Image (cartoon, grey):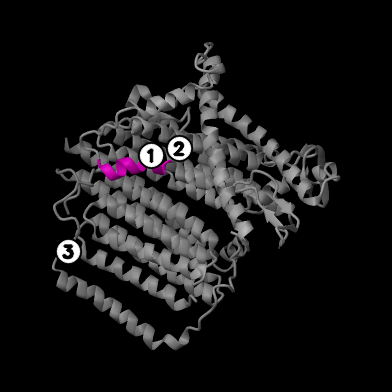
Amino acid sequence: MGSDGFEVMVNVLKIGAVFFLMVQMVPLLVWVERRGSAFIQNRLGPNRIGPLGLVQNLADLVKFFCKEDFLGQNVKKPFFYAAPVLCLLPAALAFGVIPLSAPVQIEAFSFLGKTFGPYTFYFQSFVMSMGVVFVLGMSALSVYVLLLAGWSSGSKFSLYGSLRACAQSISYELALSLSVVGILLVFNTFDFAQMVEAQSGPFYFYWGEYRVELAFLPGWGIFYQPLGAVLLFVSLFAEAQRVPFDLPEAEAELVAGYHTEYGGVKVIMFYMGEYGHILVASALMVSLYFGGYTLWPFLTQDTLALAFEGFSPTGASLMTSMVLFVVFLIKWLLFLWIFIWVRWTLPRFRYDQLMDLGWKTLLPYALMNTVFTAGFMLWMRG
Amino acid sequence: MITLNHFLWVAALLFSIGLFGALNRKNGIVVLMSIELMLNAVSLSFVAFGRFYGLEGGVLAAFFVMTVSAAEAGVGLALIVALVRNMKKPGFHF
Amino acid sequence: MSTETLTFFLLSGLALYGALASVLYKNLVLAALHLALSLLAVGGLFFLMGAWFLAGVQVIVYAGAVMVLFVMVLMLFDSGQDTQQKIFLPLWVIKTSVLLFFTGLLTGFFSLSLHLFQPLLLGTLKIYSVKDMARLLFSEYVLLFEVVGFLLLLIAVGVVVVCQSVFVAGDKKQ
């Protein structure tokens, strides 16, 4: 956490700030989804309440808070109330390990007579050298929420919805883990920060003894692992239960799947959890395959350090981190828009099509990707 | 100060609880879960020995134990599901 | 009390509580969920000892897939009904004495060999790297690795065969 009081305090505030960022993105996403989906469907969407319909979220929230808290007959109360609360927890923990910007180096300064030493503050909730494994673990644990929600509702629709959701989740977890192995082999590390820094250079590889460098391409993961990126993207859709994989919530089939029996604030919390998963999925795609917070050759830590040379070291570091955070935000928002875009473009998969895709298409391709990448890395590195 | 003995105590207690469950419960699924607990306790002691004596084989042994126990849990559950399906009454009554 | 000591006691307490609850509860879903908690706590203990990859794999595989399978099967057969007896406590004189006997045996072993284990500070941590473990897997333990891979293939095929034969038998009965 830190060696002295100042560092501990800043780190604690940082954890709160990152969580706050995640939670505050949810209303923005809801607004984008409602308006964006409306424009895609050639209608207007909510535009009466507030300018551009921005206050619609607040109105809906007030409505949800005022709803009656009803319980079905066979509801198992402790699990019924626990499931929506636990929904956001795995996603929030997973979001904490993804670096949002470059680390901030603060030189020693004196304040009120005491000197505070040089610090390095990382732009993430907690620093883990095994970030990728942690994110995979948290997405594995998020399955329990689905199970609890559906089973504790005490109705057959909810139970079947949650069992389907759970089967879908654990099938695509496999494809998710395998498609990440390729990029781990390329960048040789489990740490997100190292992976992002490795993508802030030109695209190069070794052909025998020659180093082939394509200087017009940044060294992004997607150029090293195009198939892996596609597989990961599809698996992330399935993990977050977004269309075209949202069979567990299909209205025509299962009423509302595993959150049929939930009403009022509890539904809001479920949707927050789902959007939390989407936020983590987008951040994962950006950090692994699209350069994270860097944009070689224009905006990396080195070029920005040159640009901010006039400032003090602390000021330059802060400004660099701010600019790189904006880069990350733009890429992240782009991927969030893609998630919303795909939702309103593609029809939903049938259950057997879904399972076939997970086991018979994604898994063999991911295995092939792993084997080829491993072979190529072995040949390239000696 | 945490020594090797602390970890071994925890592993031994977990193993005993698992053994108690495996021997005394009638329900097949609880027996399977107790076996998982015992295997977990063993892998904990493997890793503890490996860490305190600087051996890499401890963690690898724990990997193999985990793999085998996951496979065995899968087969056990499939057998139990098949058994319950073939009985006339629903649910677990053994 | 350093943070490591505190973390160790917290994690072991959680693991033991989860294990006890999982063998004592009659409500099967509660038992399975408590076992998942215990496995998570053991994963935390692995992390405390420096085997972070094993801790991650424990969370992903054990607590995130195997226990989910258990809970799924239990929920499918709807065996979470509340029974009269909350906790399984039969002939407790005999059964608890079995437990005590086993613990006593282990205590005896440990107190005899207490002088063998020198205390090592948790600060002298050797972080296991995945590369070294992978190198070992493919050099010294390659036979074991291949055998376990074969076992997994066998299990996958076997499970499918078992489930299919149940279907065939069920149809034939009609």
**Which type of secondary structure does the marked residue at label 3 adopt?**
loop
Which chain does the residue under circle 2 lie in? A
Residue sitting at 82 percent across and 39 percent down?
A215
In this rendering, the label closer to the viewer, 3 or 2: 2
Instruction: Give the Cα distance between marks 3 and 1.
Output: 34 Å
Residues in magenta, as a range: A76-87
Q: Quadrant of residue C123?
A: bottom right
Hey, what amino acid is under mark 1?
A: Pro
Q: Quadrant of residue B44?
A: bottom left
Comes first in the chain, label 2 or label 1 = 1
Judging depth in this view, the residue of C82 and A63 nearest the camera is: A63
Hey, what amino acid is under mark 2?
A: Gly
The residue beneath circle 3 is C89
Which chain does the residue under circle 1 lie in? A
Q: Main secondary structure of the magenta part?
A: helix
Which chain does the residue under circle 3 lie in? C
Q: Quadrant of residue A85?
A: top left
The residue beneath circle 2 is A273
Q: Is residue A47 visible?
A: yes
Q: Position of residue B47 (x, y in %)?
A: 48, 69
Hey, what amino acid is under mark 3?
A: Leu
**Which type of secondary structure does the marked residue at label 1 adopt?**
helix
